[in-house]
């Protein structure tokens, strides 16, 4: 692989390996990457207490509260706070435990609700004042949530219209959306899921400005299996532009370059918070992504990639073969008011 391709693609591959629900920033240099993953184990930033909120079925809601210690262990509670006539879940407090990557903020929690069984929560903790997001899976249904440091108060569930603590920061969080015209063509020796996502996959992500001043739009498709440990499949499409440039509707973004501008795709399987299998940009990959619509309510991206291959940044990656894919995705922005 020549250096003009290896550098930027390697950095973007590292970025998407570490993100399960949200990708806020891209990387243009090794220093940017180190800042993003918080590669300082002496002073981890993803510790302390975090508060979240999400909607549930039948107009029920729940609040999430957990504390992360210096070893990345997380303990807390999911509290179902809304009582409705056709309630699905008995209001109450249900303990959660799990772990957090102190370098990326990716977290995975589990708990048990009597009568419904095990539930899972996966997401990415926020940094630098931004709200983060998570996906909760209960009784084979998935719901999107908002999470932020406890010092910023209790957030509302996406779409809620009362209370305080509506989330802070300059990122627009994606909560749900639609996938259309999806095509997935694997090579003969591809050994992953075919197709890895479909129109029922959970859609999340974010559009906003990173800590380095760059702007990015990331849409994450996810599938969660309630195994032990929890197994999560993510399919991520990200567009990033460097500081001083804005994301533009109608612009076609080619694959990432050393300027920190471009697009990337990544498909990965994770156990807990560790990526164990994945495909991303390789030397022979071609493709692009185009923002076809962007307003206060949603973003729409057309994407097309060929020869997406095994991601060399995943340790002992068992992935083989390549795939080509295309489609259109619309991500709906979460409403806090």
Image (cartoon, rainbow, N blue to C red):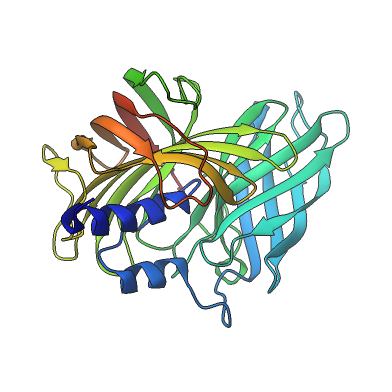
User: Could you say which is closer to the camera, residue 299 or residue 151?
Assistant: 299
Q: Residue furthest left?
A: 251
Residue 156 placement, left or right of 229: left
Q: Is residue 159 visible?
A: no
| Residue 75 position (above or below residue 318) | below
**Among the 4 quarters of the image, the one containing residue 180:** top left
Q: Is residue 148 visible?
A: yes
Q: Residue at x 79, y 44 (%)?
A: 111
Question: Residue 60 location, x and y as percent?
Answer: 68, 35
| Residue 262 position (above or below residue 268) | below
Q: Residue furthest bottom?
A: 42
Q: Residue at x 88, y 34 (%)?
A: 114
Q: Residue at x 54, y 59 (%)?
A: 125
Question: Residue 149 location, x and y as percent?
Answer: 57, 66
User: Could you say which is closer to the camera, residue 34 or residue 47?
Assistant: 34
Residue 298 placement, left or right of 52: left
**Among the 4 quarters of the image, the one containing residue 306:** top left
> How many marks are shown on the rendered structure?
0
Q: Residue at x 42, y 23 (%)?
A: 189
| Residue 156 position (above or below residue 235) | below
């Amino acid at each position: 692989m020549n250096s003009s391709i290896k550098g930027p693609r390697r950095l973007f591959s590292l970025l998407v390996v570490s993100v399960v629900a949200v990708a806020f920033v891209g990387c243009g240099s090794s220093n940017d990457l180190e800042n993003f993953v918080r590669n300082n184990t002496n002073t981890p930033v993803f510790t302390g207490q975090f508060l979240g909120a999400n909607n549930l079925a039948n107009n029920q809601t729940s609040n999430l509260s957990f504390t992360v210690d210096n070893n990345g262990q997380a303990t807390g509670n999911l509290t179902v706070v809304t009582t409705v006539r056709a309630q699905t879940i008995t209001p109450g407090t249900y303990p959660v435990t799990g772990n957090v990557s102190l370098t990326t903020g990716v977290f995975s929690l589990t708990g048990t609700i009597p009568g419904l069984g095990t539930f899972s929560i996966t997401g990415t903790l926020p940094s630098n004042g931004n709200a983060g997001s998570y996906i909760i899976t209960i009784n084979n249904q998935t719901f999107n949530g908002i999470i932020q440091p406890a010092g910023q108060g209790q957030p509302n569930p996406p779409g809620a219209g009362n209370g305080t603590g509506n989330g802070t920061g300059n990122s627009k969080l994606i909560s749900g959306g639609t996938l259309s015209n999806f095509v997935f063509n694997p090579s003969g020796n591809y050994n992953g899921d075919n197709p890895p996502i479909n129109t029922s996959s959970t859609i999340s992500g974010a559009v906003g400005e990173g800590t380095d001043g760059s702007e990015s739009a990331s849409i994450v498709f996810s599938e969660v299996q309630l195994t032990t440990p929890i197994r999560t499949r993510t399919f991520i499409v990200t567009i990033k532009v460097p500081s001083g440039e804005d994301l533009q509707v109608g612009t076609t973004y080619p694959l990432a370059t050393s300027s920190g501008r471009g697009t990337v795709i990544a498909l990965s399987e994770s156990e807990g918070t560790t990526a164990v299998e994945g495909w991303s940009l390789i030397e022979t990959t071609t493709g692009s992504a185009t923002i076809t619509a962007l307003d206060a309510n949603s973003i729409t991206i057309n994407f097309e990639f060929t020869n997406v291959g095994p991601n060399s940044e995943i340790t002992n990656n068992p992935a083989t073969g390549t795939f080509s894919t295309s489609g259109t995705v619309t991500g709906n922005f979460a409403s806090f008011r």
